[in-house]
Amino acid sequence: MSVSQLDSSPRDMTSRVTMLVSAAQEAVRGAGAVPVDAVGSTDLAEALQRVGELESAATALRLRLSSEAEARQVAEDPDLGGAATGTDAWLAGLLGSTRASQASGLRLGRLLGSTYAATREAFAAGRLRVDQVRVIVDAAEAAPDRATPEQLAAAEELLVGKATGASTRSGRPMNAKRLRQAARRMFDPIDRTLADEHELKMLTREKAGADAETFLSLHENGDGTWSGKFRIPELHGNLLETVLAHLTSPRRLGLKRAADGTTSSTIDPSAPQSQSYLETRGQGFCELIEHLPTTGLSPSQATVLVTLDLDALLTGIGAARLDSGVRITAGEARRMACEAGLVPAVLGGASEPLDLGRERRLHSATQRRALSLSHETCAASGCERPFAWCEIHHHQLSWGRGGATDLDNGLPLCGFHHRKAHDPAWDLRQHSSGEWRFHRRR
């Protein structure tokens, strides 16, 4: 009997699902038998994209089937469940997985089936990846109690659009990491006050979870080295990453002396040519340790770049943003401000001068902080080198031709793209989407 000959009876519908899944398995096996070295580059890219969509659609179907099995209490059927102590345990045995992962999948399947239609439909169509789906659902589940179903549905659709690229300026989808940042402000276009409440709730919940998971393990190897592993909150991970990025940036290691005239005492300037990336990072970590404060109660050297009104910082409503890009609660910013440098990114109070005109050739540290508000990475489209690695390029008019050293004429570029920007063979232009792209000159 063919699939098209099946009617809508329960038995035939079950056979239809099984036959369709079997047909999909055969199609994938057939594609896998094709020698990949015979596939053209264009077809290779399209095939990879379609396989990703197929994986998502298959995962969405598996979660739906798992939720149905839970609703029917299949695990309690002696002929099917056996000695399983729950649906999650039964699924783990059936699929060769773990109970914890199946319990997480069951929760996600229940929420998708009962509440989040836009996410469910995009997931089933293969337009969302499962890690994106988890971000959207977890953010929506943390919505303030006063959020109406209509507001929640609208915010969910906005996040789905960002995850698929339908509502991003560049037209490119956001990965789960970037989507998690956007999800904290998912109510922004709908209600700013509601967005503030939601962000505070998510940041507070994440911090509590991170604090509970924080640990550090160190032990001596007995051969002159130490080993260890750790897990730290997002705030402290970003602070550590920012410092290490500065210490090990290719541009810094390629110079004999730093811009301030000091010489690195730990990292050999020739290290990038002879050492791996991880070895270089390890030496950067050693340099960081060697420069720690020597007195027990020395203040922290962290800098907090505040991107909200000072009144909001004092009242605790709102969020602060470090120059590494991570957002923290206003309460945490107040705590750090007691021992760290506090740099307001808004007017009011004692603000630092940002535009230095032609008094200086290089952009100041203050200008770099200001540019980090809009650029977390190199400004070149598709480049993910961190902002700490970047040099500020006079993109409108070069300094040598009279260009000013100010914010309007500054663009962060990594060493590779900065050299490319000064190559006469290339032209750097900003597109209507806001992206900066290189075009070969004719």
Image (cartoon, grey):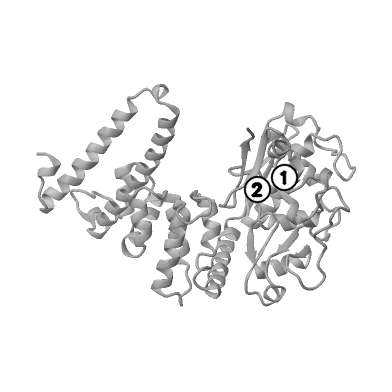
Camera-nearest residue between 330 and 400: 400
Asked whether disc 1 touches disc 2, contact meaning CB atoms under 8 Å apart, the reply is: yes
Quarter of the figure with residue 327: bottom right
Q: Which amino acid does label 1 sit on?
A: Cys
**Residue located 66% across and 35% down the image:** 426
Where residue 332 appears, as percent x and y from the top left, is 67, 67
**Residue located 48% across and 73% down the image:** 144
Left or right, 394 with respect to 432, comes to: right
Q: What element carries label 1?
A: loop
Q: What residue type is labelled 2?
A: Thr
Q: Mark 2 points at which residue?
A: 377
Where residue 163 appears, as percent x and y from the top left, is 46, 53
- Distance from disc 1 to disc 2, alpha carbons, whole Å, reads 8 Å
Quarter of the figure with residue 353: bottom right
Vertical relation: 168 (above or below) 221: below
Q: In which quarter of the image is the N terminus?
A: top left
Vertical relation: 396 (above or below) 35: below
Q: Residues within 10 Å of mark 2 (few under 14, many from 20)?
A: many
> Residue 79: which disc?
none
Q: Quadrant of the C terminus?
A: top right
Q: Earlier in the sequence, mark 1 or mark 2?
A: 2
Vertical relation: 89 (above or below) 52: below
Where residue 124 appears, as percent x and y from the top left, is 33, 51
Vertical relation: 59 (above or below) 201: above
Q: Name the residue under label 1.
A: 390
Residue 139 visible in the shown view: yes
Residue 229 visible in the shown view: no
